[in-house]
Amino acid sequence: MHKSHGPVYYSHYLMLDKLLGAQEPLSRKYASPENPESHEETLFIVVHQAYELWFKQILHDLDSVLVIFNKSVVEDSDFGIIIQRLDRITKIQTMILSYMDILETMSPMDFLEFRSLLVPASGFQSTQFREIEIKLGLNTNNRESIDREFFLGRLTEGDRDRLTQLENAPSLLRLVEKWLERMPFTVSGQFNFWDEYKKSIADFLAEDEATIMSNMAGLSDKDLQGQLENLKITRETFSSLFDVELHQKIIELGQRKLSQKAILNALFILLYRHEPMLTLPQQMITLMMNIDENFTTWRQRHALMAHRMLGTKIGTGGSSGHQYLKRAADSNRVFMDLFNLSTYLLPSSRLPVIPTEVRRQLNFHV
């Protein structure tokens, strides 16, 4: 604990002179009798500065989580810190999403009063937001709906170099992948969980097929074939989990990001989430998905607001405006593999029974 080093004054500690003096509307700088200062530009600046302050806090918390996962061994006690900080990120996301409501109190015509002064500045140039994306696991090579040169070309040389260096550092996606690959529970002695899981899946899908066939009298040929085709696809989807070569091809096609072992172990965590040793990892996986979902929602809301404010106008940074933002919201997700794990879940009553020696590893013994 730090000790006092003398009295501290509120405004000095928070540097309010600098903070509150950082709003300098360009419409004030270039105001004239014909074009007076735009009242709404101050709102625009304050909201975006608030975004950047909260992005700074997100990076502060995210960096601390990356430090933990960079260790050769992640201790059980570390998960309390990881979950606390990831949870705080989700709370910040919820708050900054509400800033859209405040921005939308500005009318499109009010925005047009000063918009031309902003060219070519753009949200593209929020390097903190790009840092967050990269540190989560989305680098410029993986971005859809925009090419790398367009993306980096909107930045200063210094920002470009810094983000390029960040892309060479391990992201949360890759660090969690390595941690998942080290999980020891699924194969132990004579027990191979995945052999038992495949049997449970086969029985489960056989019952689905029996249900379809028992109802075939009430189905048209088209409906029957459709249901059987869906069942076939489901079987193939499950099979892809255990086919090393097929899994690698799916990664090469960009449809999966995590290694086969990481995906299987993440699935094990979700299937047995109530086991004491897996409860905190399951919460972590859920928070990672929440963060991904929240940024997707934020991008979608941003796209809608851009459409509302600009219609089909080109963005100030040269993008296609709301069309680009809409595509980015749909495409630029980091933890899609974790969302897709729901495909492979079974009812708890169908899960393989874990042997006693493995269950003891998953429980606290006091």
Image (cartoon, grey):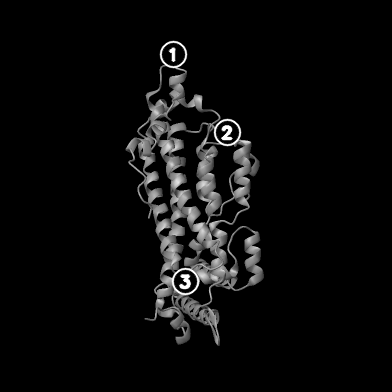
Task: Single out the mark in the foreground, 2 or 1.
Answer: 1
Q: Earlier in the sequence, mark 3 or mark 2?
A: 3
The answer to whether marks 1 and 3 mark residues whose Cβ atoms lie closer than 8 Å is no
Name of the residue lying farthest toward the front: 6
Q: Which residue is mark 2?
A: 318
Question: Residue 273's x, y, as percent?
Answer: 42, 72
Of the pair 347 and 260, the residue shown nearer to us: 260
Front-lying residue, 82 or 255: 82
| Callout 1: SS | loop
The residues bearing labels 1 and 3 have C-alpha atoms spaced at a distance of 64 Å
Disc on the earlier residue, 2 or 1: 1
Q: Which amino acid, mark 1? A: Ser
* Residue 171 drawn above or below residue 99: below
Q: Say which quadrant the N terminus sits in.
A: bottom left
Name the secondary structure under disc 2.
loop
Q: Going 54% across and 45% down the picture, which residue do you hit?
A: 130
- Residue 310, x across and y down, in percent: 47, 32
According to the picture, the residue beneath numbered tag 1 turns out to be 32
Q: CA distance from mark 2 to mark 1?
A: 28 Å
Q: Which residue is mark 3?
A: 269
- Secondary-structure class at tag 3: helix
